[in-house]
Image (cartoon, helix red, strand yellow):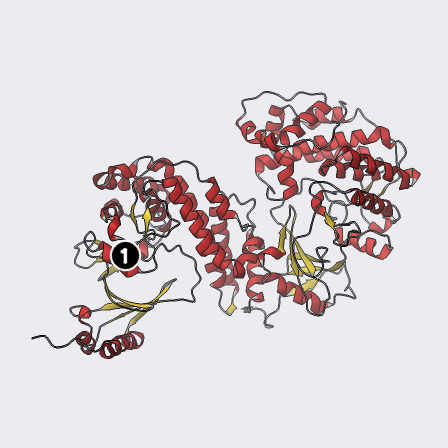
Amino acid sequence: MPGPPPRARDTSDAFDELVHCAKHEGEFSRGHHNLNYVVRPPESVGVLLPALRGHDRVTVRKRIHTALPVVIRTWQDEAKILDALRGVLPHVPQCLVRREDMTVLSFVQGVPLSTVHPNGKRVESDLISALAGLLADMTQVRRKDLPPLPPSWPRHSRDSRAFLRALAMATEEQIRKRNWRKFGGLFATLGIPGDAMVRFAERVPAMISRPFSLLHTDLHRDNVIFSYDGNPPLICVDWELATFGDPVHDLATHLVRMDYPAEQWAEVVDAWRAAMELRSGEAVKGAERDLEHYVDFERAQSVYPDVMRAVTSLGDTFDQRELDAATHAVRRALLLAEAPLRLKSVPDEKSIEGILFRWNVSNGKQHSKHQIKLHIPWRRDPRLSEHPDFPAWAVRDALFAEGAAPADHVFKGTAHLSTAVEVRDVPLPVMVRRKVAAANPRERRFLNEHVVLGVIETSGVEVRAPRVLALGTSGPHLKDQFTIHSYEGPKGEIRHPDHPAEGLLPYEADDLVDQLCELTRIDCEELGSDTLGQDFFHGLRLELLRMVSGLPKETLALARELGLPGDIVRLGQILDRHMLTPRRSVLLHGDLNPWNLVRREDGTGLTLIDWEMAMVGDPLYDLVRHMHLTPTLPDIRERLFARWARKMPEACTKGWRDDWHVYRWIEYVRSAYVDLDRLVTGDSLEAPNVRRAVDTYAMTLKTATASLGLNVRSTANPYLAFALPRSDHGQVWTNEHPAHM
């Protein structure tokens, strides 16, 4: 007659004894999410925990609750998944005992596939067929035997498009959002916007319907075991990331995570198709077409864990070899995610190294080469002496704060990455600016921005512009140039500035003109750099020809197809038709687009930022270029011209009524080439001023070709379908077009 069941206290003690034995005598391995101990259960434990009897060894697994949330989990309890597999895949691990965050699993005897075939190495055809068979066998697990699915899962168990969108949104909720507070600034600095995965979900196209089934989703070489007895020859382990959905997703994750050589992908797909047709023929419908969408998703979502694991892989003290390895891993992840996430640019390795270095030091780590902990090494640029309001310690603190700044303090433009930070004992925030290495400087820079801003500050003119507080280089090799400016955003807190994106208000138009007038008081000799020459318009023409001649051949070929001159000789002949009245040269901002104008909260007008395209030249050009770059209604245009003509010195305004059309014409021509190149190369499309420009490209092209006396061509060029429909939502902001020249 059986005795009474063991008392609860006895089984609890037995479990504690097993855990103690595992921690002190077991074989330990650490995964990304679990601590695993393989141990022989003591006989005394087996008496009180009958499920362990007959098991020579078991695996004691403990969830690491402090681990980064870098995976999608459909179900939280792996034991329930394993229970559902018993009838179909009886050799997978079984859950023997479960206590809170610890489980005891049966131990799978064998050798991991990764030991025999390391990542990147070829896999024999017979083995590929066996792996494909494992994936196909999972389709035999019945839906009713699996745990309940989360509410976000598709209602219909054949809707492949809804499934992929659910995966993308699960990435957003379970990975991106949970890590954004700590890593958001890092991702923003690397060029991954906060809404990248949401936009991926929005772009998921129509897909073929296939019956859903159980998916492993993590079938890589460490999770496949060669069994010792060969029955069965292969066993899948680690089912905690399993889900229920389109089996093509499992094929995609297997292809990517197994790290097959590229030449074996087709063989794997063929083997999967052959195995799947024997078990679930409908599962292969449209598989080849939709596989690319799942591969894109796998590479897109992987950028988050890959970057976070790389950056956190560096210990409290790291050396250059470790920094190089992390840099390479991050760049590889970014390059793989570039197309599916539509990243606009991927930083080069030098830039990534600097970003990772600053992030780690700002988070309490230390490069072994540098003895002072919590310090970003930097060197002052001799061209700019120490600012009295921003000594060396303030520079050091600003660089330290830059590395740990949150995502909403990072501002990425076409040429600069700017990070707003607060520095102790400095009353207002400052902006750390670094050039974007991948930026394409189509338009030449003539003056050093720090010199221009320095002259504005010391001259006493009433122009609202940032102050340059420091100039130098930083990073492990002291080659990463930075500038620190005063922060010209809202006072009291760091948040995105308000820009006149839809055009200036009347008082703002007056204020802009007044500041342009103040620029005439600056002695241009102090700027110490060349200009476009005494004949400004002639120099402007030559600069446009230089820029066009340097465009990629693909851009110039498309320009010819669209009706623009494709060679500088013909373009030069057209440009040479016009001569302008000479006017006095003054300092020009050079790029007064709305995002370089910051609205002041006190209602006093605008602050002019980003002076890197400043030049010395005709003051009429600065005003006309502003109206070209900014939505300008007719009454505001007339207000700008009237105040400008009245307040400017006469030497700066003579002949302006005849000449302003010419400047606007040449700006349309310039934009026709620059925006076309951005459409072709995809460069800087995330910047709002660039996005607006390319979205109205058809209008720009039509106006530019008409101004040149040419016609837009009808063409079957495949680029045209990409370039021109962007004008569908464009709008004309002025009631005049440039004169036909």
- Dividing the picture into quarters, in which one does residue 297 lie? top left
Q: Is residue 239 above or below residue 15?
A: above
Q: Secondary structure at mark 1?
A: helix
Judged from this view, the residue extending furthest toward the left is: 1
Judged from this view, the residue extending furthest toward the right is: 650
- The one of 377 and 694 positioned closer to us in this rendering: 694
- The one of 706 and 367 positioned closer to us in this rendering: 706
Q: Position of residue 552 (x, y in %)?
A: 61, 34
Q: Position of residue 452 (x, y in %)?
A: 79, 51
Specify few, some or many for label 1: CA neighbours under 10 Å numbering under 14, 14-19, or 20 or more.
Answer: many
Where does the C terminus fall, quadrant-wise? Answer: top right
**Is residue 438 in view from this perspective?**
yes
Q: Position of residue 725 (x, y in %)?
A: 57, 29
Number of numbered discs visible in the structure rendering? 1
Position of 120 compared to 273: left or right?
right
- The one of 694 and 311 positioned closer to us in this rendering: 694
Position of 344 compared to 242: left or right?
right
Q: Amino acid at mark 1?
A: Ile
Where does the N terminus fall, quadrant-wise? Answer: bottom left
Look at mark 1 in the image and give the residue it sits on: 81
Kindly identify the residue that appears in the image at 83 percent across and 30 percent down: 659
**Is residue 551 in view from this perspective?**
no
Kindly identify the residue that appears in the image at 48 percent across and 44 percent down: 200
- Dividing the picture into quarters, in which one does residue 276 lie? top left
Position of 469 compared to 195: left or right?
right
Q: Position of residue 236 (x, y in %)?
A: 26, 55
